[in-house]
Image (cartoon, coloured by chain):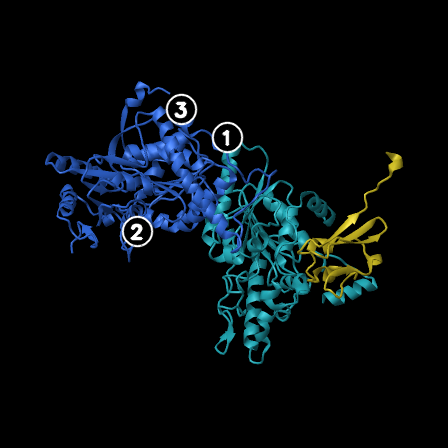
Chain colours: A cyan, B yellow, C blue
Amino acid sequence: MPNTKELARHEEVQKRFTGAHALCAGCGIPICVRTILNAIEEPVVAINATGCLEVATTRYPTTAWNIPWIHVAFENAAAVASGVETAYRALRRRGKVSQEIRFVAFGGDGGTYDIGLQALSGALERGHRFLYVCYDNEAYMNTGNQRSGATPFAAQTSTAPVGERSFGKSQRRKDLTEIVAAHHVPYVAQASISDWYDLAVKVRKAVSVDGPAFLNVLSTCPRGWGHPSDQSIKIARLGVETCYWPLYEIIEGRWQLNYIPEERLPITEWLRPQRRFAHLFEPGKEALLAQIQRQVDADWEKLLRRCEDLPPAPFPKREWEFSSPVGERQREIWR
Amino acid sequence: MNRYAQGNFFLAIEPRRCKGCGVCVQSCPQGVLALNGEGKVEAHEIARCVFCGLCERRCPDFAISVHKERAIQPSLV
Amino acid sequence: MRVAPEQKRLTLITGAEAAAHAMRQINPDVVPVYPITPQTPIIETFAQFVADGQCDSEIINVESEHSAMSAAVGASCAGARVMTATSSQGLALMLEIVYIAASMRCPIVIAVGSRALSGPINIHCDHSDSMMARDAGCVQIFAENAQEAYDLMIIAQRLAEDRRVLVPVMVMQDGFTITHSAEPVALLPDESVREFVGRYEPLYPLLDTDRPTTQGPFALPDYYFELKRQQVDALEAARTVWLELQERFAEISDRRYKGFFEEYKLRDADYALVILSSTAGTAKVVIDRLRRKGIKVGLLRPWLFRPFPAEEIAQALAHVRAVAVLDRAISFGSWGPLYLEISAALGRHLQQKPVLYNYIYGLGGRDTPPELLASVVTDMQNEGDPAVLRYLGLRE
């Protein structure tokens, strides 16, 4: 299983995805993408939906990609991937291609939960061997933070804004991970940019199955969510620690939780540092906060009941434990 | 490219790639890194670095990386 | 290759089956498909061929036409030979991606069973679907009958994959009239087709991981225009390649396609009809009857609509007194698409122009019997006003 040194070595040799792209400072997407690409041993062909990642990494005549990469449109990453993967099988069978290649499709929540849902569903049902990664930053961020089906309840976006008569998005977000699981595919998981090891392990598992795999990765957006760029990892971590974004897998239909926080943080810890939720901390909005907490609680309970395999105890609170004064100071910063 | 060495290891920082997001500064368990006056990251406490590689793993822009010096010993060749 | 006696054997098959036979013999790598009337028999017949092992293409039964074309682009860019089929609403749904396929230089052959666009929903023949797609950057070829539907699919594959072209090629056959009517068709031997289409050698396959490419980038105003200009050259090259392939096709069959359009009794004609696809067949019968009465009428039936052979058509029509262009589609707010092309062609290339009339006919599968076509010639003889848009077979 991967460690930082292995991933670093792999990356140095392959250089599959490079810097000097135009993604924002502190963006969660490149953290997600580089972790994923470097956790895969075999050669990779990437398929990309329109969105932040595609636009900011391939402004003609430059590119940040050192692997074969294709973008066609917004809603069809999974359909394009189906075509690429089928071509691979056909040409392999006909003796024109001999190497093992892995196919990874990247789409934002916009191109996956909403406009891309049909193509994803079709590809999953047909059973193509590919990994679909949704980098979920919870809105159409490339075009300036318009709401998507992944935008959480009560979040501010430009098309469901907070105003005199509105507290932001009035609908709950979809549970796409569950929708994907309903397609009976071999591997589905939720991950976060805050837990790179967990993500890397999941990627390895995902590409090893002979069928479709899906990763829903929480990916912070400093601009859209309204937080300082250096807080990206921390805020993603808060999503996990508040059980807003649990880390779990569904392997051949068996639900398996990967992480139970020792102390579950209240959902306000997740909401408070993000300006898109700032209006919820004004007087008179307590009922909304309570409603959100109830929803998170209910979803977490449901997930616990569903998961047959819970992680072994004790589970480390942080990925590193320091008892030195420096560690204490870092814990302060972390908090 | 700026090198910050400690024994056989060094941190390589490419300021032209650094966007000053500060994620590496926040990620470092040892407090090695900080943003300078131009908003670019520097390893101002390299002696504390344990070369865990977290900064490299998390940099969105490939601006910082951890290396071990290649041992070049011509007398053994 | 000499014409073997077996080639003369005719098979009674529909236009859809003929297209499916062409696909079977071409045996592409990947075929992403979605059903829609009236092209469905094409993909059903082909699916049966695959199921029975008569060819071994990978069929992807996608969940919409948009995904069919998306998968086609993915497979083509990966390095595979790709074919698909659609009609009407299906073509409308995949149209977003058809433009992209052309811009990404994907040599995909698209069989089209020409069908009216909604609304109201109508499953019968007209040319509104292919005309909707005329600006997308594909080569567009119109077949009159089942034999042409077969021949032109085979030529289309080689035309698309020629390195000077590398754009999708749409091959239209009239919905129901041709797709569902059985005609005697001469099928070529499998080896002839295989040899004619040859191997597809992609330039930049995604599956070549040693030479990675970024395909389908984001382009700003500083580059977009030049990239689109390159597509103009691709369509221009298609003219040359089309003519070259006609020569090659004549070597393996006794059917000679010559030039960009069929001329039927046009050389000495006083009046000309310009019609695409199957109604031209009716027109030929009408022309023969009128000729027996001493009226010198002729027909010009384009095969290529895109690229539009403007100069050649203008020269072919230069000598006639009047031309009636029959359009089985209309550009609302303007006139018929074929008329608009011909009018521009005559304007660009001729000093003396024949009088030009436009008739809209056959929308939504409305039948056009011989008498109506004959009345068009009578109108031309009576020197009607060319500034009036006319309709054939419409109850006004």
- Residue at 33 percent across and 41 percent down: it is C311
Residue contact between numbered discs 2 and 1, judged by CB atoms under 8 Å: no
Q: Where in the figure is residue C64, as x and y percent of width and height?
A: 40, 48
Q: Is residue C50 visible?
A: yes
Total labels: the figure holds: 3
The one nearer the camera, C335 or A146, is: C335
Q: Is residue C193 above or below residue A215?
A: above
The one nearer the camera, A26 or C381, is: C381
The one nearer the camera, C242 or A256, is: C242
Q: Say which residue label 1 marks.
A: A94
User: Of discs 2 and 1, which sits in the foreground?
Assistant: 2
**Dot 1 amino acid type:** Arg
Q: Where in the figure is residue A85, as x and y percent of width and height?
A: 52, 41
Q: Pointer 2 indicates a residue of which chain?
A: C
Quadrant (top left, top right, bottom left, bottom right) of the C terminus of chain B: top right
Q: Where in the figure is residue C365, as x and y percent of width and height?
A: 23, 47
Location of residue C170 by image quarter: top left
Q: Say which residue label 2 marks.
A: C117
Q: Say which residue label 3 marks.
A: C191
User: Relative to residue C109, is residue C121 drawn left or right?
Assistant: left
State how far apart marks 3 and 1 are (Cα): 18 Å
State how far apart marks 2 and 1 are (Cα): 39 Å
**Dot 3 amino acid type:** Glu
- Residue at the extreme right: B75
Q: Pointer 3 indicates a residue of which chain?
A: C
State how far apart marks 2 and 3 are (Cα): 38 Å
Q: Is residue C150 above or below residue A229?
A: above
